[in-house]
Amino acid sequence: MGKLEIVNRKPVIDSHSKICTTCIYDENVPAIKFDDDGVCNYCKMIEDLKTQYKTATPEGEKDFFEIVEQIKKHGNGKKYDCVVGVSGGTDSSYMIIKAVEWGLRPLAVHYDNTWNTAIATENIRKILGKLNIDLYTHVVDNKEADDIFKSFFLANVPEIDGPTDIALAETLYRAASKFGVKYILEGHSFIAEGVSPLSSAYVDGAYIKNIHKMFGKIKMKTFPNMNFASFMKWILVKRIKKIRPLWYIPYSKKDAQAFLEKEYDWKYYGGHHLENRMTAFNHSVYFPQKFGIDQRNNSLSASVRAGLLSQKEAINEYNSNPLVEDDLIGYFKKRLNLTDQKYADIMNGDRKTYRDYPTYKKRFEKLRPLFFILAKANLVPMSFYIKYTSKSEM
């Protein structure tokens, strides 16, 4: 049998596209709007966040180090005063190192979806070993994880790797609760990574449960899903706060990578989100080929805003095909027990969204005023409030 043809819907930005004057988001980005100067609403969102968090200013750093003192105070007498998620990637690796430099006593937490690359695993080992940091890991049963991933693939929705995000969040909360820790540090930077457009990409615990119920075959036992009651328990009863230091302090991903390579023999894995094979498949193959989504426009737009790339350079990179690891697609098909024909049928088939399945989205929208208060108190990330409680315009 010859090679089955997959329709590649990878988006491009061409001369006919209306493009933001300060990034590379174009008119095809979901829910985008342009002002009279051609600046998009997402660039304005970034500017609003910079103003709100006083990002990379002396005032922002002052605010953050006041939080650090609160973390130390609440953690007094305990073995750990914060938890930090680690993946082996740039941001989380840098974050755990900085936490130690700030005089904190972090517990490293890792959710293993069993699709890690060897590079990422080794990066975690090197950094935690040199820092003498304890590691709390939740490893999901690999067949169960694959069954959940396959369920999302068969459901024809974009969020195939969404379960990893929910499971990591739940694992972080569980670890914090287990050790009486009130603070979770996350290594996200909206300056370096941007903010993903409001779109059809969405995930929550109900979505995972219902997709798996419809399409899965293996009972969910070891997967740490987060239902609504658990979410409320973590943020309202346990009052565990999520802090994103890189929203306050200066940060350069390029400088962070150079530092990690020099001081910790850390290895780069080839691109943003490529430290995990499922995440790499999602961003480099599944999103662009099936759904016409290329999330590199987030970080590339961030680079243009920061003056690290010209708009032309960023567009040229965006219009090129994403980096795909050798035999990544073959590995995906083998892990999920998919024939070439079944894989091609799904990739060329229907394109559905979370709106086609039961979720908590409407509930989050109704509770928008509550979540604004919780976001201001660092009990949920501000990005959750912005994206999950807004009514979609698609």
Image: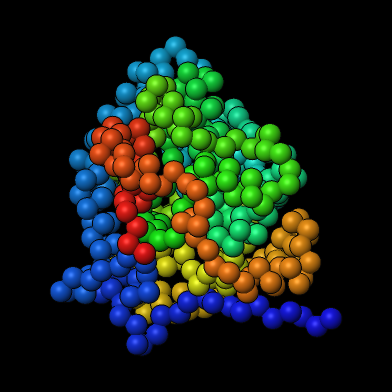
Q: Nearer the viewer, residue 38 or 302?
A: 38
Q: Nearer the viewer, residue 362 or 32?
A: 362
Q: Residue at x 59, y 62 (%)?
A: 156
Q: Is residue 199 left or right of residue 157?
A: left
Location of the N terminus (image quadrant):
bottom right
Q: Where residue 371 sits in the image (x, y, percent)? A: 31, 38
User: Total of numbered circles in the picture?
Assistant: 0
- How is the protein colored in the picture? rainbow
Q: Quadrant of residue 63?
A: top left
Horizontally, is 259 left or right of 248 in the view? right
Front position in the image: 233 or 393: 393
**Relative vertical location of residue 14 with respect to residue 254 in this rendering, above or below:** below
Residue 388 placement (x, y as % from top left) = 37, 48
What's the residue at 60%, 30% (across, down)? 136
Q: Is residue 246 above or below residue 77?
A: below
Looking at the picture, does residue 274 appear above or below residue 300?
Answer: above
Q: Is residue 103 in view from this perspective?
A: no
Residue lying at the far right of the rendered structure: 1
